[in-house]
């Protein structure tokens, strides 16, 4: 029989997996919203068309992550919601504005489409900045100080830049012509800002957290972590060099920037997980302390075992069906 500790770790892994998949999938469509240009309606239509079949389903992973937090780690959920009530409200407002704008632009085929496009861009920017701020507060265990607020603000900018980075990479993969060239330019600048942000956070994090410093700079952990920043630097340089030469002949390797940035997301997430495991709230509450009773976790596990494969299958199927370059946006 599986012990309680193993059940807790399984749910902690599943919640982390849902957050990572959300960051990659909803990250690129939030990034596209942030990048949405106001000077060219045709480019806006192409960008919206590239995320049309996916954007709503991408948010399913956020719902799954929050659901696991609520049901499997109710004590942590209570603490997180208490500390982040206001930014969570702002995040929800941003996501609602995005959803309303996405649908209304389809019906505002005359003078109001630009207005809804601006609202979609604003909602994407609000959601991205708020998520980054919330991550910054969470990483420092909701510490209340000027330094902690400054770190959260830095995190907000970096996460938004990272979303724009992967959004631009997605457009390089899904579009052609002038928009693809513009997307490569956007992605290069966003990537540089995101890289600076990752480096800054990597420097600040061990300075403000003795626990993180101990894990990063003590043996054998320090040896295991050395390849991560080296791989990240190599990926940033390789993606930047590819973007510099877009478009390549026959659009060869157009998928590489997106895969490369997704790998950066994975490595960054691994670094955070290594820094704070087994805490579900860094420095405040471990997963075991926050977990529901064993009987509840076993019962919930049955539902997750059914739902998670279905979500994965649907996600894989939808991306398989709509693989390739985006077609011209049409409303009927």
Image (cartoon, helix red, strand yellow):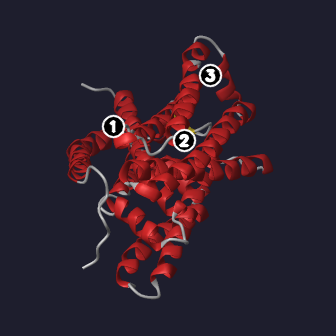
The dot on residue 294 is 1
Closer to us: 6 or 206: 206
For marks 1 and 3, the one nearer the N-term is 3
Residue at the (39%, 64%) spot, across then down:
46
Q: In the image, is 299 to the left or to the right of 213?
A: left
Closer to us: 227 or 110: 110
Frontmost of labels 1 and 3 is: 3
Frontmost of labels 1 and 2 is: 2
The percent coordinates of residue 173 (x first, y second) are 38, 47
The dot on residue 244 is 2
Q: Quadrant of residue 326?
A: bottom left
The percent coordinates of residue 157 (x first, y second) are 65, 52
Q: In the image, is 312 to the left or to the right of 82?
A: left
In the rendered view, tell whether residue 261 sits above or below residue 158: above
The dot on residue 215 is 3
For marks 1 and 2, the one nearer the N-term is 2
The N terminus: image quadrant: top left
Residue at the (65%, 28%) spot, across then down:
212
**Mark 1 burial class by Cα count in 10 Å: few <14, some 14-19, many 20+:** some
């Amino acid at each position: 029989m599986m012990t309680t500790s193993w059940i807790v770790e399984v749910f902690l892994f599943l919640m982390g997996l849902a957050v990572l998949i959300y960051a990659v999938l909803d990250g690129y469509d939030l990034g596209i919203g942030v990048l949405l240009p106001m000077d060219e309606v045709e480019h806006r239509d192409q960008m919206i068309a590239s995320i049309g079949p996916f954007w709503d389903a991408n948010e399913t992973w956020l719902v799954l992550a929050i659901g696991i937090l609520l049901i499997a780690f109710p004590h942590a959920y209570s603490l997180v919601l208490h500390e982040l009530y206001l930014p969570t409200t702002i995040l929800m407002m941003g996501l609602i504005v995005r959803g309303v704008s996405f649908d209304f632009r389809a019906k505002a085929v005359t003078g109001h489409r630009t207005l809804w496009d601006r609202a979609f861009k604003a909602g994407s920017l609000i959601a991205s900045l708020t998520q980054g701020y919330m991550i910054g507060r969470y990483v420092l265990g909701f510490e209340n100080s000027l330094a902690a607020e400054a770190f959260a603000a830095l995190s907000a900018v970096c996460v938004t830049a990272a979303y724009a980075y992967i959004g631009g990479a997605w457009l390089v993969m899904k579009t052609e012509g002038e928009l693809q060239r513009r997307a490569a330019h956007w992605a290069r600048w966003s990537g540089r800002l995101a890289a600076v942000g990752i480096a800054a956070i990597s420097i600040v994090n061990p300075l403000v957290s003795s626990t993180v410093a101990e894990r990063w700079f003590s043996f054998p952990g320090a040896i295991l972590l050395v390849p991560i920043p080296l791989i990240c630097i190599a990926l940033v340089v390789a993606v930047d060099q590819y973007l510099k030469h877009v478009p390549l002949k026959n659009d060869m390797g157009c998928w590489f920037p997106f895969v490369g940035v997704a790998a950066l997301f994975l490595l960054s997430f691994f670094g955070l997980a290594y820094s704070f495991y087994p805490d579900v709230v860094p420095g405040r509450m471990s997963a075991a302390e926050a977990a529901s009773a064993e009987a509840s976790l076993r019962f919930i596990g049955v539902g997750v075992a059914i739902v998670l494969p279905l979500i994965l299958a649907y996600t894989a199927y939808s991306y398989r069906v709509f693989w390739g370059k985006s077609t011209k946006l049409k409303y009927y």
